[in-house]
Every structure is written in C-alpha cells, then in structure tokens.
Amino acid sequence: MRQSQLLANTLREAPAEAEVASHRLLLRAGYIRQLAAGIYTYLPLGLRVLRNVERVLREEMDRAGAQELLMPALQPAELWQESGRYNAYGPELIRLADRHQREFVLGPTHEEVITKLMKNEINSYRKLPVTLYQIQTKFRDERRPRSGLLRGREFLMKDAYSFDISWEGLDQSYQAMFGAYQRIFDRCGLNFRAVEADAGSIGGEGSTHEFMALADIGEDTIAVCSQCGYAANLEKASSVVNQVGSGSNVDRPMSEKIHTPGVHTIEHLAQYLHIRPRDIMKTLIYLADGNPIAVLVRGDYEINEIKVKNALGVDTLELADAETTAAVTQASVGFAGPIGLSIPLHIDETIISMEWGVAGANESEFHLRHVVPGRDFIVARVGDFHIVKEGEVCARCETGKLRFVQGIEVGHVFKLGTKYSEALGARYLDANGSEQLMIMGCYGIGVSRLVSAVVEQHCDERGMVWPTAIAPYQVHLIPISSKDTTQTKLANDMYDAFKQRGVEVLLDDREERAGVKFNDSDLIGLPVRIVVGKDAVHGKVEYVDRRSNEKQLLSLDEALSRISASTL
C-alpha cells in the first residue's frame, strides 16, 4: 500500500477523553474514529489488525475442530424470556420493538440462539459432539462506555459453543478450547493468565476461567499465588482465613449493651471503643430477589456480593435502603446486628473464628459487646462471603501468599452444563432411543478488546509496537527524500519485490519531511522499518527493528531475505 493513498490521518494530540494508552494511540495513529460514546469506525489500518486477529482465531478454532457459522444479531425477545435471562441480564440488554410491536433484543451473546438452532438441527447422539463458532458484532448498553475499545457498546466478539452427550465429553471440549485460547493469545503476543472466575449472567454448572491480559489499567483484580499456579479473579478468589480466636463458649461474658451515639461506620466504632476492626461483626441488610437477608462478615473484611449471590442462587442482590433496613432491624443504618433478626442470616467464615465481637444492637445509637457466634445467634448458614486480602495464604496450596495484579479480560471459557438446553428443550435421542439433554460449553474472545489489550502491552513513548502476527503491515518502507531519484527507484524496487514475495508493506511515498515520516512510522508501529537514504547509491538500506530500535545497514537482497524469513 502506498501511504499517500491510505486513509490514515495521524493526530499530534489525542482527544482529552482518551485516558488509556491504547485509546490515545489508536486514535492518534489513525486506526479508529469515534462515532458516538462506545461506538467506533475502524479505518483501514484498524480493520487490517482486526482481520489479522480474526485469521489467528479461525486457524486455531479450526485446528481445535470447531466449525464456523454466522447467527443473527437481532434476536426475538421470547428466546431470552424462555431462558430466563430477559429480566436477569439487566439494563445492558438493548431491547427494541419492530413496527408490529414484536419485541427483540440486540444480541450481547448467543447462548439462546445457538441452543434453539441445535434443538432443531440435532436429533441423534450420532451427530454429537459438535463445536460451533462465529465472529460477529455484539451490543451492550454500557452505563459508562470508556477506555476506547476496552469497554464499548458495540464490539466484535468470537463466541463458540460446544454440545456433548456427557460431562466427560464436555471436559474434552473445554480443554480443546482452553488450549486453543492459549495458542491464540500466545500468537497475538499477549502476556496473559488464565484465572478462575465467576460465570456471571451467562451462568453454568462447572468450571469457569477468564483469560486476563496483564496490564496496570485493567479493571479486574487478580489474586495470584506466589507458590502454586492458582490464579483467580477477585470476585472468585479464596484464601485461608486468618484465625483471631478459638475456644468454647463456656465462661465467656454475656453480651452487654453499650451506648454508641452517632457511630455509624466500622472505623468510627473501632476508634470509639478502642478496639480493632477485626473485633467487630459487621451486619449488612440486602434484598435477594426482593427478599431481605442479613450477611455477617468480620469488620476488617468487605462482603463479596457475587459470592453471596451465587450461594443463594438468586438473580438480583442489592444493598437494602435505609427505609428497608429500619423496617427489618428497627434501627437506623449502622446499628444492625444478628441477634433477634427474623430474616435469614448468612454468616461469613471469618465470623466463626471469633471468640466474641461487637455487633449492632438493632437499636439506634447502641451496640452489643461480647457477642458470641453460636451462643447468641444461629450460625447454620456459613460460607465464604468475603473479599480476600493481598498477602493472605493461598487456599489451594496453603503455603503461598496471594499477591494482586491487574488484568483486562480478553476471553472466557464456561461449562454451561444443561442450563440452556433444559430451558430451551435442546434434546437428542441416545443409543437406547431415550431423550437426553445436550451438555453445553461456551467460549468467548473479545476481538476488538484484544486489539486494545495488545496495544497496552506493546507500546512505548513514541507509539505502538505491533507483534508481527497481527500488524497491519509487516514493513514500513520509507525513502527519506521523494525528490531523490535514486532513493525513489530503490524504494519502488523493494516495494515490488516485497509484494512479489507476499510481504505486506506500506510505502511512505508522501512528500513530507523525514522527521514527519519517522514520527508517523513510530506512531503506527509496524514491526520493521526500512529507511532508504544516502546509502541508496551503494544499494544499501537501513533496517530498523521497531521494538529494540536496533539499526543495521543491509543490502537490498539481505533486507529482502531477512524480512521474508521473519514473516514465514
């Protein structure tokens, strides 16, 4: 491609709203342009990167035995109602009606559509297992689109779905996709970790892993063990609970009421009573599918609402408002406690290790001292409901310490089981002629998000540094002076030679100063730059590695051979 003909206007400065490096650089280098919040046009350079990522995806998905298809983005709402996700998915689901007032959704994912398809297409165990995938635009009404392609309302995704006749078969399909994902991210040059995670609104009945690109700007916090291979999203991570006390309930003083005027927070209560936050039993009132519950956790921990929601098996979990809290506890917010509550109590495991603690008295301006779990309130519903802390002991190996790193979710693999096949009636006849439910898996990669994640990891102060596998072009060919006939001829000869060898090359034939060309070249970030300058009279060019900035003077044949070898 000749750069004079390329639609790729570079910008000296990125718009003020571009906060992360990938957003700034993709805008400045002319890869993308924003149409509306969270909605982008891919200019030729950006589209070439997308297509290269798609090529890697297709090669590895096909290698893993998956078959490509394409499903509609516009989906009937009754499918989502039948699966139970129409209301549960939340406000991110874009809903609309046609001229006949039939309800539809713009697909954020395709579990319902693929299950409906397989219900109609598969009737025998002889046609299973099968894994199908597509690369398609998805839609989610993000409350606050931000960070460019990392969180948009319209984005490109590769989603795949496996259908098996047994859980053992699902295990094999899951591992095939897991391996394919590792190869995909390796080929894209990504530094990533596969971490245990929560299935979220997609749901499921088995293993769930997210693939995280490690980056300081990542929205997800990952707990990683210093000894074993354990890694989990913070919403899923577990640790060995730090024990703060033990012993029987015998001879412990009875609870006593203490006046705590105006003390509404854990920090204030600890200061007021000269105790530690871990000596406090924090009680919060939630609405689980509209029904009030109480969750208890030690005062030095935070409640993990996702763990609570999963343990209860509810669709919605939200912190109760002040009015509801007062109705349930007979006290204002900040004074709730477990004793005397008539609603279900869900006790975090951190509470069980406490000999005694301070808790709300369910009376405004009062707390109770010397509250003993098991003596003063029932501890029947106990679970892991807290967010782990950095430095705690790993629950997997019970030796290593957890450290936190940030990550960008670029892919996920779920064992769905029979959640969707049961809801939508996807059955097959087994060898005995009996109907059985198909056992499903779900596997997604955010293609456009992956592009941004790669940029976050592969950039410097000058611009992007694309890995060869997904770069829009492999070589940036730059004659310093467009008026120098020797340079121009050598550059054109090299351009033709590269094209004949199948090397994708961008020739900067613009009538610009050398400094402008070099700055734009750094910004665009192609893996190799070949500069045709004063040594052209001797048949020599400067070969520059964009990543290391290493420079070598090579002959035409040497440059052609090196580039051809590096792109095989």
Image (tube, rainbow, N blue to C red):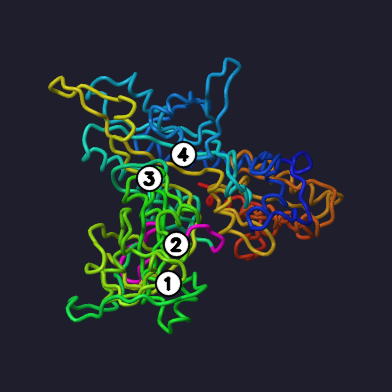
C-alpha distance separating marks 2 and 1: 9 Å
- Residue 69 versus residue 140: which sits nearer the camera? 140
Q: Is residue 300 magenta?
A: no
C-alpha distance separating marks 1 and 4: 40 Å
Quadrant position of residue 303:
bottom left
**What residue did someone put label 3 on?**
413
Q: Is residue 275 above or below residue 505?
A: below
SS class, disc 2: loop
Where is residue 261? Give x, y as percent.
50, 74
**What residue did someone put label 1 on?**
366
Q: What is the span of residues highlighted in magenta in the rendered image?
A: 216-237
C-alpha distance separating marks 3 and 2: 45 Å
Q: Is residue 350 above or below residue 505?
A: below
Q: Residue furthest top?
A: 100
- Residue 276 versus residue 563: which sits nearer the camera? 276
| Residues under numbered marks 1 and 3 in contact, where contact means CB atoms less than 8 Å apart | no
At label 4, the amino acid type is Tyr
